[in-house]
Amino acid sequence: MATQLNIKGKNFLRKIAFSATFGALLFGYDTGVINGALPFMAAPDQLNLTPAMEGMVASSLLLGAALGAFFGGRIADIKGRRKMLLILSVVFFFATIGCALSPSFDVIIVFRFILGIAVGGASVTVPAYLSEMSPVEGRGRLVTQNELMIVSGQLMAFVMNAILAVFFGEAGHIWRWMLSVATIPAVCLFVSMYRMPESPRWLVRQGLITEALGVLKKIRNEEEAVVELEEIKTNIERESSVKQVKLKELGTPWIRRIVFIAIGIAMCNQLGGVNSVMYYGTQILQNAGFSTNAAIVGNIANGVISVLATYYGIYLMKRHGVRKLLMLGFVTTMVCHIIIGTSSLLFAHREFFPYFILLMTVTFMMCNQGLIAPTTWLLLSEIFPMRLRGMGMGVAVLCMWLTNFAIGLTFPVLLSIVGLSGTFYTFACIGVVALIFVKFWVPETKGRSLEKIEEDFRAYGANDEEKAKQYIEKL
């Protein structure tokens, strides 16, 4: 009987994960679809976009995502994870239709911004919901499914762009169909989440103990459900007794050091140029010599390698230190940038050049998605002590989205001014700075408890205060 209950619970948990990660799929699709849609959208007989306007179209979603990520978690705390995902599905649907039907540059900027709010909200709500629904032993695998669905959504966007471009590319308005495909997973998110339960942790926070126990019994056997309910109640009581960090406490050396490192990691993740390939891969390949349709089809390789590299990155993190992997990631991506920049100077007119650039962008994506991306999120989740985690993660993710916005806004202009070589040399220089930052600032967290990590940061802070006192005394 217990076995049957476990099997039913696991099956229901799979349904929950499948339903919620439509939000992650939308996240990936809406950030990736612009890659193939932009060349058609920019045509004179369509929206007639300049490079600066292309950057604004791509990055307006990212600015909205920064806002959605910052406030999304707070709204989900009030309304509930399930209800938040239902709300986001509606926003996804109508914002997508607005983008697809936009008659002008100004209108699509507005709807892309609104769509970005939904993307940002999903980026914090989906992993929170999955984390709170999953058992302890399966939490890593279930939450990682969110990351896999994001890159799968980007791959789906690249494939759909290629299919539509190859078979219907002569129709100038094909970009509208590329964008409108996202309405399908938006409907799937609403329909599937409508039948899913609320997070038991959120229900306990609202005092709905009976409802929380009912949810747990659906995904655990009865004994496990009762035990876990008591654990949730105990943890929530413990968290409520923990004094939260106030803004003035950011002046404390050890807390300031953690926030500085978290923001640095988040910004380095974006400044490496990964999303320049995700958003503008088609333009990069066009610049290298591919036709528009060939560039869109070639971009599928970047999506495929992103999915495979994410799997491999999860495997590597189990066996190697995250700091070592992060440094290796910046070294390898920097080498890719230098090779792309140099080859564009030396071999730009050779027949093999477009294919070589495609190979190097695929190699770059493999190194970034397999080494930098997974270690970034793991480090951000580990270096914050419990009472700093909510505020700290909010600030770090906000900085990440804002940096993403800056890259998305300036990349087309940079590409048009300094060309392919100058653009990737710029990314290589940023990679050097990122490598130095990780070398001297980022701690190794593998094999160390969260309490030990916090203790070490406190020790650094105490040393800083002592050095400051000694310096003042000398003066």
Image (cartoon, rainbow, N blue to C red):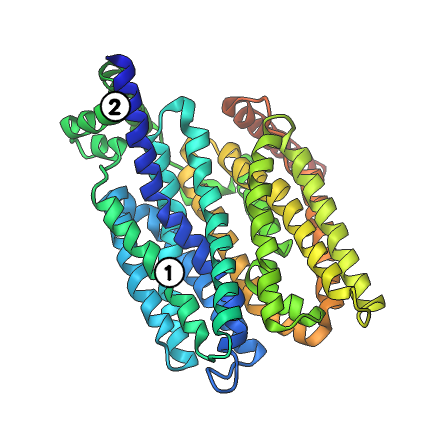
Position of the N terminus by quadrant: top left
Q: Amino acid at mark 2?
A: Lys
Residue wearing tag 2: 233
Image location (x, y in percent) of residue 179:
41, 67
Image location (x, y in percent) of residue 283:
62, 69
Q: Bin the neighbour count of mark 1 within 10 Å (Cα to Cα): few under 14, some 14-19, many 20 and up.
A: many
Q: Residue at x 60, y 42 (%)?
A: 309
Does residue 395 appear in the picture of this structure? yes
Q: Quadrant of residue 265?
A: top right
Does residue 78 appear in the picture of this structure? no
Q: Amino acid at mark 1?
A: Ala
Q: Residue at x 37, y 33 (%)?
A: 131
Image location (x, y in percent) of residue 137:
42, 22
Q: Bin the neighbour count of mark 2 within 10 Å (Cα to Cα): few under 14, some 14-19, many 20 and up.
A: some
Position of the C terminus by quadrant: top right
From what the image shows, is residue 363 above or below residue 5? below
| Element on which disc 2 rests | helix
CB contact under 8 Å: marks 2 and 1: no
Return the residue nearer the eye: 66 or 243: 66
From what the image shows, is residue 74 above or below residue 53? above
Q: In the rendering, which numbered label is found on residue 200? A: none
Residue wearing tag 1: 182
Horizontal side of residue 203 vs 19, given as left or right = left
Image location (x, y in percent) of residue 161:
49, 64
Q: Residue at x 56, y 37 (%)?
A: 311
From what the image shows, is residue 175 above or below residue 129? below
